[in-house]
């Protein structure tokens, strides 16, 4: 996968995230994907778990994500973002380390906040 393909996949995923549409968001993940977010102290597995994460932290806090940058690393894409929403900080930086399949589906995400 080229950097351009990585960037397109990440751009489209961020757009789906900001739509607050669970079906659109989950369409980017494999059925058995794992999302590990140490900032909330949980690992979310498969569409049911990742859907719960999305509803709680993105829809629930009216979170909007702005892409700051991407960097291909060894086996994954490092994504820097800025979150805004109704959560206590109102604005905070974050990272996603995203592992994609050859079909551009997300297999694994490590998410965290930059404090």
Image: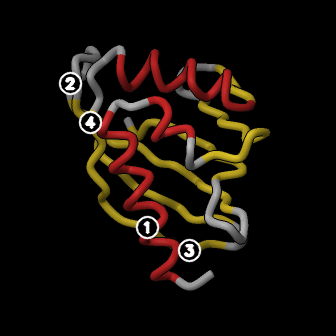
Mark 2 to mark 3 CA distance (whole Å):
29 Å
**Which residue is disc 1 drawn over?**
70
Q: Secondary structure at mark 2?
A: loop
**Which residue is disc 3 drawn over?**
72
Mark 4 to mark 2 CA distance (whole Å):
10 Å
**Which residue is disc 2 drawn over?**
90
Q: Farthest residue toward the front?
A: 23
Query: Mark 3 and 1 residues: CB-CB less than 8 Å, in contact?
Result: yes
User: Residue 28: where, in percent of width, then height?
Assistant: 56, 49
Q: Residues within 10 Å of mark 4 (few under 14, many from 20)?
A: many
Residue drawn at 72 percent across, 38 percent down: 34
Nearest to the observer: residue 92 or residue 54: 54
Disc marking residue 16: none
**Does label 2 or label 3 sit earlier along the sequence?**
3
**Which residue is disc 4 drawn over?**
64
User: Residue 25: where, in percent of width, then height?
Assistant: 48, 39
**Does label 4 or label 3 sit earlier along the sequence?**
4
Q: Residues within 10 Å of mark 1 (few under 14, many from 20)?
A: some
User: Residue 110: where, in percent of width, then height?
Assistant: 62, 43
**Does label 4 or label 1 sit earlier along the sequence?**
4
Residue drawn at 43 percent across, 71 percent down: 7
Quarter holding the C terminus is top left
Mark 4 to mark 1 CA distance (whole Å):
17 Å
User: Residue 89: where, in percent of width, then height?
Assistant: 25, 22
Q: Residues within 10 Å of mark 3 (few under 14, many from 20)?
A: some
Residue drawn at 54 percent across, 22 percent down: 53
């Amino acid at each position: 996968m080229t950097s351009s393909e990585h960037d397109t996949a990440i751009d489209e995923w961020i757009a789906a995230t900001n739509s607050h549409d669970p079906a659109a968001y989950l369409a980017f993940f494999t059925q058995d994907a794992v999302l590990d977010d140490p900032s909330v102290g949980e690992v979310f597995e498969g569409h049911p778990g990742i859907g719960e994460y999305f509803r709680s932290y993105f829809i629930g806090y009216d979170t909007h994500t702005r892409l700051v940058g991407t960097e291909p690393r060894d086996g994954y894409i490092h994504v820097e973002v800025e979150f805004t929403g109704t959560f206590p900080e109102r604005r905070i930086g974050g990272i996603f380390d995203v592992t994609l399949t050859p079909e551009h589906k997300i297999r694994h995400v490590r998410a965290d906040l930059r404090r």
